[in-house]
Structure formats: structure tokens, C-alpha cells
């Protein structure tokens, strides 16, 4: 053991002997290990760490899948859920969840919109989570009339109620109704992970109308597998159940199948590919850093050939010397790992601030035991990788040549140069893969940002409102509220126009089945569908959506007048190809929906990318909000102010003037919403571009280092060539040719690897092929040109060798 510590101390002395070289090596390793640690901490928290529920691997989400519909992972209706719960043979518990929201008033504070969920009583036992105070729901509280109870989240309890220990058993006012607080959840409880924070849970109850509507699918269902039941067995059982349900309900369940997905997979499927691509990218950066440092180690080992030969000559074993070299490289890599860990702390903070807010467990990302073990493992593996090849080469010298003062083995030098050249080839290949990946992402992001959203996002402020139906039960009262609100807001100085919508772009989506007059109705599952929203007359002006044909809504389009609607150009082209859509009639629902009125198309609006810039334009229909009001809306305000948020206090006052208990929430500018919609793409481009740039820099340094070292080694040879009449051009051709051979081989290998690996990124790209020829060509040319310059600089130095000095070399 004492000899090991002796080697460790000797390793530190060797590092201090050439502090400049040591600094470069430690910095390269710290960058590589730090980047890997930071990204791995995200991957570990989001993808690898089990969810904080009991036996989380047994928790499944249960969905419908219908091959005739374009969407997948469809929710269940109340009758579906009850059938699944009662007739399955593979689940311990089955629970249903649906979104809910309340206006919280009273307590002497401003009204506040609270994101909530209605859940069946089995949910908390299914998750294996108990309340921190009080209790959760019972089955009796799922009954209508007994469901005015809540379980509160810890954050709301702390923020709004000052952690009042006596709150359990008291009542709070939600949507102007009294609810009794049954319990408080633990501080670290989140469900579902990766969604908007839920602050309240209420019991899920079903009215007779909902129980009769098997086609009304709005429930998300979670289930816990029985002990010993596999996912395959559960899927088989549920598929049998879906067939029995189809036989019993052919009108709504024919050709529908049940899909099971582990909860963790469902929560992370949108981010897993991007995170693994980034983890692979930083792995490449570390490999390139290792290749650079290995080249430095090879150069230092070559300088110690005489020292090693003397030790071998006086009796040291080769095994003992190899161990010394490995310990020295491990000391170097562990030092780099320590500084890399410090960099990772900063990098994780930066990542948390830029990662999209819907990333599951974002606030939990940090350095834990698994991340520390990962960093230690990477550092040790790097040390072995760095030290092995130099150790094997340095401890197998030509004894006679090495013991001659200043002598150098030509054969040994060629062997070392081959290894160093191979390392440079590897660096170039890996750098090219990263650069091509980054180039594809940048081109994809550029094309994404070039998409015109269909509305003008500049100087538009949006905010959401939800009218409690207990206070605004009648549609007329809701319509009157919105009319008064728009009129008051439009009178605020600095407001150009204002309008409300129930389905704003980038925020919400409502779809409806259609029946078009004069067209044959389609079978169930094949229905004509479109996105729809109720809007006020000023909405199109506020959002900058053009009316390309016909007219916009007016105040005359109100209850009692002829039902009208405006459709998008995509809607008109889809349902009325080659025809004039103006004057055509349609209604929501199927032909059997007699209560649904026929609506006449009076205008055609421009197309909007409702679901995001990377989604196709959808078929949209707009209905006057006075003819079909809804409780939840978004107010859009176009302003003349440079900062639309500056008008928020004035708009808030107008809302309070109508109803002091009405909160507004989710206040954002449309520019902010648009930026948020491409946040994940922007992050991928930024990080991949950063890692690719680092790899590019390291590869160029590696090329320069190898060629520069080769010029130093061949000083005598170059002097002889110049003395025998070689021109500067001949020397340039000799040295640059050596470098470009490595570069060309690296480019060929990199292109082959890129064609194979960039296909993994296909799902992350927008209107760009994973094998885009222009990107492959331009990135290869860029790397080749810079690599040429990295070879040319030491080649120029070689042309200035003085033959007289070179011939006296050694």
C-alpha cells in the first residue's frame, strides 16, 4: 500500500513539473466530465430514478387506442372506467383522474385560480401515498351531494393558509361553494409529475347523464398491476375485455383496443429521445477530450523513455511501471473529475433555468449518490483509458537506443505517431458526428422559426378567466360578462383591440364532431372533426388573424339571431374542395343530435398553427361567444405599448370592477407563448451546438498538437531535406499532407457514423431529413478547412527550419 501512495505522490509531482500542460489536460477533462455529469444528472432524475410512489414500476396508465383516429392514448368515459375497474383480472386497483379548476376566494386575500384534479378514491392508495395531516377520500365521498370535500397540497396550505395546523376540518370557498378540508398532502407529493402543479384534489363523482354517455371520453385512468402479473399478461387480459366491451357496445367501442403504458414511460416519452441524444453528445465530447489528453500523455511518455529504460535496467518490473503510469493518469483524471463536478453544480443550475417547465421532476434535478458514483466511475475509467496505451508503449522501449544519451528509436517513434494519428482520426470522426447533429438541429430550428403562426404575436397580452358556474350558471350571464369585459378593456388607454376565445392557439384545444348539410354522415370512429372555439367579435383583430373571405362577427351575432360561424381556410379546403364555403351549413355532433342548431358559414379566416409551429395547420371553426358562451376563456389584448405587461394592472382593475371575486391567471404575452412553444427545440439546439463547438475546438487542438509534435520530432529529417534542395512548397506538402490524411480518414469514418446515428434524431427534426446532404457536405467542408489551417500553421514553422541547426539536432 505504501508503494501505491508513493506512486500517487510521484504522480502529483509529475503534474506540477509541467503546470501548463497539466492545466490544459485538467481543463479538457473537467469540461468533458462536467458536461457528462450535468446531463447525466438530468437523465438520472427524469428517466432513471423511480417515481416516488410505492412499487412505481407496477403503476400503468390505461388508454384507448383507435386505428381509425389520428390521435392515440385516448381517455376513457365513465362507463368505460367502471367496466375496466370491475371486470379486469390483473389490477389491484384502478383509479380515474380528470382536470378540474376552482376560484378560491375569501380568507381576506385576492381571488386565486387553483389548478385541481378530480380523482376517484382509489388513487392515493394506488400510489401508496398517505396524507401528512387528516385523511384522503372514501368511496362514499364519490357520491353527488357528499363530494364537497378536498385534499389540499402542501404548497397551497403553506402559501395561502400560513401552514395553519387547524385547517383540517374547516371549510374553504371554491367557486362560491363551501368545501371541507379533509387532509393535507406531504410536501414532496406531486401527481401527475411533469404537469402543472396540482394544489387541490376533489372526489370524482358521476351524474346519471355522464354514466349514460359512453362516447364522452374525458378520464385518464391509472392502474396498479397485481403482484407477479407482467405487462404482457395485463395487456392480453385487457384486450380480451375490450373485445367483450365492443360486443356489448358496438356503437361506441367497435375496433377500439386498450393500451397499457408504464407511468414513468408515459411521463417522459416527450423528452427521453432529446435527453439521450444530449447524453450521447457529451459522451462524444469526453471521448475527444480523452483523445487529446492521451496524445499529451503519449508525448510525455516518449520524453521519459530513457527514465523508464534505466528503471527497467536496474530491475524494475514492467508491471510495476505500468501501475505507476496508470496511477499517474488516474491522479490526472480524478483531478479533472473533481473540477468537473464543481462545473456540474453550476451547469445543473443553468439547466434547471432553461429546461422546459413540463419536464418531470425538474425541481429535483441535482447531484445525488448515483450522480457522484457516475462521476467517480467516469473519472476512474478515463484514468485507465488515458494511461493504458502510454504505459504499454513507454514500458516496452528499445533498451540500447533508449539508454543512449538523447537517442531516439525511429521505429518506436513511428509506432507512437501511429497511435497519436489514430487518436486524431477518432477525434475528427466524433467531432464530425456532433457537428452534423448540431447542424441538423440548427437547420430544423431555423425552419421552425420561419413558420408564420397565422397570427401577429407582437404587443398582445393574454390572460385566462374561469367563471364559476354556481355564480354564472346561465349562458346569458356568461355572455353578458364577456361583453362588458371586452367593452371596458377596449376603453383602457393604450389598448387597440380586445377579444375573448375559449380555445386560444398554443394554450388549448377543443374538438368537435361535425355533420355537414348535404354530405353523407360517416360511421362512428370515422367522423368529420375540427377544432372549435367560441370568440367575441374583436378576437380576430386582437390576435391579428385575417378574414380572407366573407365577414367577421359583429354584435348582432348574439343569442336569438341566426347561428353563424367562421371557418379557417384549411377547413374550407378540406370539407368544401373547389367550392365557396360561404353560405354552407353544418352543425356540431351527429345527425341524431337534434338539439344542435344548424350554423351558416359567414366568413373564412386565415390558417393558424393552433398546436405549435411544428404542427400542421388544423381545420378550425369559430362560433360567436354570445351564441355559445363557455365558463373558461382567454382574453387577448392588443396594445400600442412596447411592453404589453404594463397594461396588466389596468386590465385587472376592469375585471375587478365587474366582479371583485373573479381572478385572472396564466398571464403571458403571445410572444412569450410562442417562445415557450419552441423551448425544447431551442434548448436542444443550444446544448448540442455548445457541445459540438467544444468538440470542434478540441479536435482542431488535437490536429495542431500532433502535427506540431511531429514537426519537432522530424526536425532533423526536415533539415536534411532542405539541405538536399527541398523547397518550402515541398515541406508544406509533406507536413500538411500528413495532417490531411488523418483528417480525410476521420471525415470518412465520421460520415459513415453520422448516416447511422443521426437517424436517432429524426423525431426531433422539423422539415429536415436526418441525412440532409447539404448539412453533411457543408459541415464536412468546414471541418476540413479548419483542420487544414490547424495543419498549415506548424507546417509553416517547419519551412523555417535552419538546415545547419537541424543537422546538429541530437
Image (cartoon, rainbow, N blue to C red):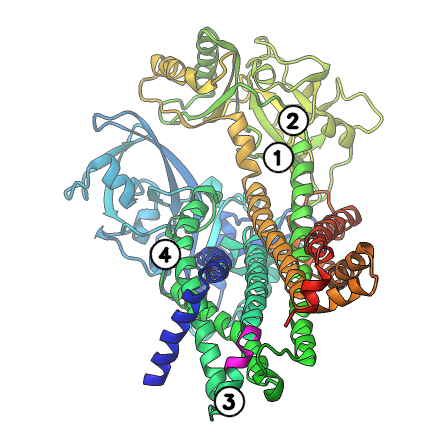
- Tell me, for residue 621, which label it has, or none: 2
Q: Which callout, 3 or 2, points to the residue nearer the camera?
A: 3
Report which residue position mark 3 lands on: 312
In depth, the one of 696 and 14 nearer the eye is 14
Q: Nearer the viewer, residue 332 or 343?
A: 332
According to the image, label 1 marks what residue?
Answer: 512
How many other residues sit within 10 Å of disc 1, few (<14), some (14-19) or many (≥20)? Answer: some
Residue positioned 53% across, 60% down in the render: 261
The verdict on residue 98 being magenta is: no
Q: Quadrant of the C terminus?
A: bottom right
Q: Earlier in the sequence, mark 3 or mark 2?
A: 3
Instruction: Determine the image quadrant of residue 707.
Output: bottom right
Precedes in sequence: disc 1 or disc 4: 4
Q: Position of residue 300 (x, y in %)?
A: 54, 70
Query: Is tag 4's residue or tag 3's residue first in the polypeptide sequence?
Result: 4
Tell us which disc is closer to us: 4 or 3: 3
Instruction: Tell me where residue 328 sits by quadrant.
Output: bottom left
Q: Are marks 2 and 1 in contact (CB under 8 Å)?
A: yes
In screen coordinates, is 456 left or right of 550? left
**Bounds of the magenta span?**
302-307
Amino acid at each position: 500500500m505504501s508503494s501505491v501512495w508513493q506512486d500517487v505522490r510521484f504522480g502529483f509531482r509529475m503534474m506540477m513539473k509541467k503546470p501548463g500542460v497539466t492545466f490544459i489536460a485538467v481543463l479538457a477533462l473537467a469540461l468533458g466530465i462536467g458536461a457528462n455529469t450535468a446531463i447525466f444528472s438530468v437523465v438520472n432524475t427524469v428517466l432513471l430514478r423511480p417515481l416516488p410512489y410505492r412499487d412505481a414500476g407496477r403503476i400503468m396508465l390505461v388508454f384507448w387506442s383507435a386505428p381509425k383516429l389520428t390521435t392515440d392514448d385516448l381517455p376513457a368515459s365513465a362507463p368505460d372506467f367502471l367496466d375496466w375497474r370491475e371486470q379486469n383480472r390483473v389490477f389491484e386497483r384502478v383509479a380515474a383522474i380528470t382536470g378540474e379548476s376552482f376560484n378560491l376566494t375569501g380568507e381576506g386575500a385576492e381571488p386565486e385560480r387553483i389548478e385541481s384534479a378530480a380523482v376517484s378514491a382509489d388513487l392515493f392508495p394506488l400510489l401508496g401515498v398517505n396524507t401528512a395531516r387528516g385523511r384522503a377520500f372514501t368511496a362514499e365521498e364519490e357520491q353527488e351531494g357528499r363530494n364537497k370535500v378536498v385534499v389540499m397540497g402542501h404548497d397551497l396550505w403553506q402559501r395561502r393558509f400560513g401552514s395553519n395546523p387547524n385547517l383540517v376540518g374547516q371549510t374553504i370557498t371554491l367557486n362560491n361553494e363551501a368545501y371541507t378540508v379533509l387532509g393535507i398532502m406531504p410536501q414532496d407529493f406531486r401527481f401527475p409529475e411533469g404537469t402543472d402543479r396540482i394544489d387541490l384534489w376533489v372526489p370524482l363523482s358521476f351524474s346519471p347523464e355522464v354514466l349514460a354517455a359512453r362516447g364522452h371520453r374525458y378520464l385518464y385512468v391509472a392502474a396498479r398491476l397485481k403482484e407477479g402479473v407482467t405487462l404482457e399478461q395485463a395487456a392480453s387480459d385487457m384486450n380480451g375485455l375490450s373485445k367483450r366491451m365492443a360486443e356489448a357496445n358496438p356503437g361506441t367501442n367497435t375496433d377500439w383496443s386498450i393500451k397499457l403504458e408504464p407511468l414513468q414511460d408515459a411521463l417522459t416519452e416527450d423528452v427521453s429521445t432529446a435527453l439521450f441524444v444530449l447524453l450521447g453528445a457529451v459522451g462524444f465530447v469526453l471521448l475527444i477530450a480523452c483523445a487529446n489528453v492521451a496524445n499529451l500523455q503519449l508525448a510525455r511518455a516518449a520524453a521519459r523513455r530513457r527514465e523508464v529504460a534505466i528503471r527497467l535496467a536496474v530491475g524494475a518490473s514492467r508491471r510495476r511501471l505500468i501501475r505507476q503510469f496508470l496511477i499517474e493518469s488516474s491522479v490526472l483524471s480524478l483531478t479533472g473529475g473533481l473540477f468537473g463536478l464543481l462545473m456540474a453544480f453550476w451547469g445543473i443550475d443553468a439547466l434547471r433555468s432553461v429546461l422546459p417547465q413540463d419536464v418531470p421532476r425538474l425541481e429535483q434535478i441535482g447531484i445525488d449518490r448515483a450522480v457522484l458514483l457516475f462521476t467517480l466511475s467516469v473519472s476512474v475509467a478515463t484514468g485507465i483509458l488515458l494511461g493504458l496505451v502510454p504505459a504499454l508503449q513507454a514500458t516496452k522501449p528499445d533498451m540500447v537506443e533508449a539508454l543512449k544519451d538523447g537517442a531516439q528509436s525511429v521505429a518506436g517513434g513511428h509506432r507512437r505517431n501511429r497511435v497519436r494519428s489514430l487518436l486524431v482520426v477518432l477525434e475528427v470522426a466524433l467531432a464530425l458526428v456532433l457537428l452534423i447533429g448540431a447542424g441538423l438541429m440548427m437547420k430544423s430550428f431555423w425552419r421552425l422559426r420561419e413558420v408564420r403562426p397565422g397570427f401577429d404575436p407582437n404587443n398582445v397580452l393574454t390572460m385566462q378567466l374561469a367563471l364559476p358556474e354556481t355564480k354564472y350558471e346561465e349562458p346569458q350571464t356568461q355572455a353578458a360578462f364577456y361583453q362588458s369585459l371586452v367593452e371596458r378593456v377596449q376603453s383602457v388607454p393604450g389598448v387597440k383591440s380586445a377579444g375573448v376565445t375559449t380555445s386560444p392557439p398554443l394554450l388549448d384545444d377543443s374538438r368537435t364532431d361535425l355533420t355537414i348539410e348535404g354530405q353523407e354522415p360517416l360511421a362512428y370512429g370515422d367522423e368529420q372533426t375540427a377544432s372549435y372555439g367560441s370568440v367575441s367579435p374583436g378576437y380576430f383583430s386582437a390576435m391579428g388573424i385575417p378574414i380572407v373571405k366573407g365577414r367577421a362577427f359583429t354584435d348582432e351575432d348574439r343569442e336569438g339571431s341566426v347561428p353563424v360561424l367562421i371557418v379557417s381556410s384549411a377547413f374550407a379546403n378540406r370539407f368544401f374542395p373547389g367550392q365557396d364555403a360561404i353560405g354552407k351549413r353544418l352543425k356540431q355532433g351527429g345527425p341524431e343530435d337534434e338539439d344542435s342548431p344548424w350554423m351558416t358559414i359567414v366568413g373564412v379566416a386565415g390558417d393558424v398553427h393552433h398546436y405549435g409551429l411544428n404542427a400542421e395547420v388544423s381545420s378550425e371553426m369559430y362560433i360567436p361567444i354570445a351564441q355559445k358562451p363557455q365558463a373558461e376563456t382567454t382574453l387577448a389584448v392588443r396594445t400600442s405599448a412596447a411592453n404589453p405587461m404594463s397594461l396588466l394592472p389596468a386590465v385587472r382593475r376592469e375585471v375587478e370592477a365587474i366582479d371583485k371575486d373573479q381572478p385572472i391567471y396564466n398571464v403571458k404575452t403571445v410572444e412569450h407563448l410562442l417562445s415557450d412553444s419552441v423551448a425544447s427545440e431551442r434548448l436542444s439546439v443550444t446544448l448540442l451546438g455548445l457541445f459540438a463547438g467544444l468538440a470542434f475546438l478540441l479536435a482542431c487542438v488535437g490536429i495542431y498538437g500532433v502535427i506540431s509534435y511531429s514537426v519537432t520530432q522530424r526536425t532533423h529529417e526536415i533539415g536534411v531535406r532542405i539541405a538536399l534542395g527541398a523547397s518550402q512548397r515541398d515541406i508544406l506538402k509533406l507536413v500538411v499532407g500528413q495532417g490531411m490524411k488523418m483528417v480525410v480518414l476521420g471525415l470518412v469514418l465520421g460520415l459513415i457514423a453520422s448516416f447511422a446515428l443521426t437517424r436517432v434524431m429524426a423525431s426531433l427534426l422539423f422539415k429536415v431529413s436526418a441525412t440532409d446532404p447539404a448539412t453533411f457536405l457543408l459541415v464536412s467542408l468546414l471541418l476540413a478547412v479548419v483542420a487544414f489551417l490547424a495543419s498549415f500553421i506548424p507546417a509553416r514553422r517547419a519551412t523555417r527550419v535552419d538546415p545547419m541547426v537541424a543537422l546538429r539536432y541530437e
